[in-house]
Image: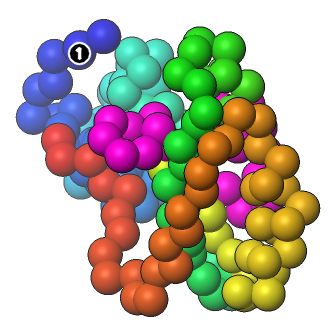
Amino acid sequence: MEHTLDRIDRKLLKLLQQDASLPNIELAEKTSLSPPACSRRVARLREAGLIRKTVALVNPRALGYNGLVIIGVVLDRSTTDSFAAFEKSAAGLTGCLEVQLVTGEFDYFVKLRIQSIDSFNELHASQLIGLPGVRQIRTFVCLKEVFETTVIPV
């Protein structure tokens, strides 16, 4: 569903993507709106589905998640049922950040936060090998996280 955004809507979305904890009064000041008008605008953006949810972005390293792996998965069958079973199970993997259905050599990419290679090895043995319908798994250990953002251009 597409929503027509004016200049103020775009500014609100940019500001909220940078810091969603900004108080309404600050948002209002930065957009030259009254606080009630600003609050109504943000509520409309939420109702229109332009703001899905508000979260805190936690520092993974501060919680001991020092690694990132991306796993390429090939399923043994390409059926609606096999895709659904895999997706449901993969979303429950410990440290799972994303599950993406893709084109090309793999059926899915799964992005996981890990504490260490040892913890990944345990996860591999206890969870990954048991995923339904999996024919092949290829793991890519990230050596350096170069760039990551949650900001969508508006």
Kind of residue at badge 1 = His
Q: Which residue is mark 1?
A: 3
Is 56 contained in the magenta span?
no
Task: Name which residue lies at 38% across and 56% down.
Answer: 150
Is 98 contained in the magenta span?
yes
Along the viewing direction, whichever of 101 and 11 lies nearer the viewer: 101
**Mark 1 residue crowding within 10 angstroms, few (<14) / some (14–19) / many (20+):** few
Along the viewing direction, whichever of 94 and 136 lies nearer the viewer: 136
Task: Name which residue lies at 63% across and 78% down.
Answer: 60
Q: Which quadrant holds residue 126?
A: bottom right
Q: Is residue 127 visible?
A: yes
Q: How is the image coloured?
A: rainbow
**Secondary structure under the numbered disc 1 in the rendered image:** loop
Q: Is residue 114 above or below residue 150?
A: below
In the rendered view, does 62 fall on the left or right side of 93?
left
Q: Position of residue 50 (x, y in %)?
A: 36, 27
Q: Is residue 53 above or below residue 105?
A: above
Task: Name which residue lies at 49% across and 72% down.
Answer: 140
Q: Is residue 55 visible?
A: no
Along the viewing direction, whichever of 8 and 59 lies nearer the viewer: 59
Quarter of the figure with the C terminus: top left
Residue span colored magenta: 87-108
In the rendered view, does 40 fall on the left or right side of 78?
left
Q: What is the residue that sits farthest to the left in this orientation?
A: 7
Quarter of the figure with the N terminus: top left
Q: Position of residue 139 (x, y in %)?
A: 55, 68
Q: Which quadrant holds residue 102?
A: top left
In the rendered view, does 114 fall on the left or right side of 56?
right
In this rendering, the count of numbered labels is 1
Task: Name which residue lies at 79% across and 87% down.
Answer: 118
Q: Position of residue 108 (x, y in %)?
A: 49, 42
